[in-house]
Image: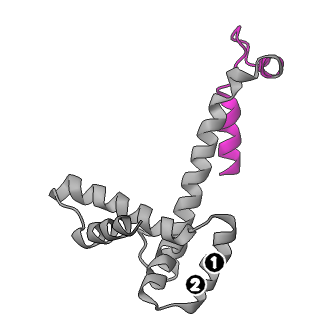
């Protein structure tokens, strides 16, 4: 994967005059020409991290469609896992409400799929969201 990433990153880089070997000079003098490939590298890396998180969830015997954080968020809501609560608090130091946001993002994503396929949404979750908004 690393070699493929390096080849992808540098294969399309050409100098403005079309010379493949003069791109280093142009990258140093006109860096805006070379920012675009890095945007795709970041997206590639994020997709791989997300996939690795889902694989870890499947290996732990959890729902393979969810990330481990989303599963821990579910366990905390149901009160089934004390260790999950500790882990999510530690993650909360880096990303506040990480597990809660992970489960909300997962539910929102699959509600879009349900809406597209069946023309309906998860009513229980929508009622929960409406109640939380009313409390604010």
Instruction: Count all numbered tags in the image, as a single digit.
Output: 2
Q: Quadrant of the C terminus?
A: bottom left
Residue 28 magenta: no
Q: Residue 89 got which mark?
A: 1
Dot 1 and dot 2 residues touching (CB under 8 Å)? yes
- Magenta segment: 1-27
Dot 2: element? helix
Q: Which numbered tag is attached to residue 85?
A: 2
Q: Which mark is residue 41?
A: none
Return the x and y of residue 111 as percentages of the image width and height: 29, 60
Q: Residues within 10 Å of mark 2 (few under 14, many from 20)?
A: some
Give the image quarter of residue 13: top right
Can residue 3 be seen at all in this image of the molecule? yes
Q: Answer with left or right where residue 33 lies relative to residue 67.
A: right
- Image quarter for residue 96? bottom right
Give the residue displayed 59% in from the left and 38% down from the top.
40
Which residue is at the far top?
17
Element assignment for label 1: helix
x, y percentage for residue 12?
64, 26
């Amino acid at each position: 994967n690393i070699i493929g990433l390096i080849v992808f990153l540098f294969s399309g880089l050409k100098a403005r005059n079309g010379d493949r070997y003069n791109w280093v000079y142009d990258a140093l003098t006109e860096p805006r020409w070379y920012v675009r490939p890095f945007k795709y590298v970041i997206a590639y890396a994020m997709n791989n991290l997300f996939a690795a998180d889902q694989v870890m969830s499947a290996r732990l015997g959890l729902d393979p469609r969810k990330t481990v954080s989303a599963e821990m968020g579910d366990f905390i809501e149901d009160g089934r896992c004390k260790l999950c609560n500790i882990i999510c608090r530690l993650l909360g130091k880096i990303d506040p409400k990480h597990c809660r946001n992970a489960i909300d993002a997962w539910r929102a994503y699959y509600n879009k799929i349900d809406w597209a396929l069946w023309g309906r949404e998860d009513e229980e979750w929508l009622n929960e969201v409406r109640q939380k908004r009313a409390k604010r």
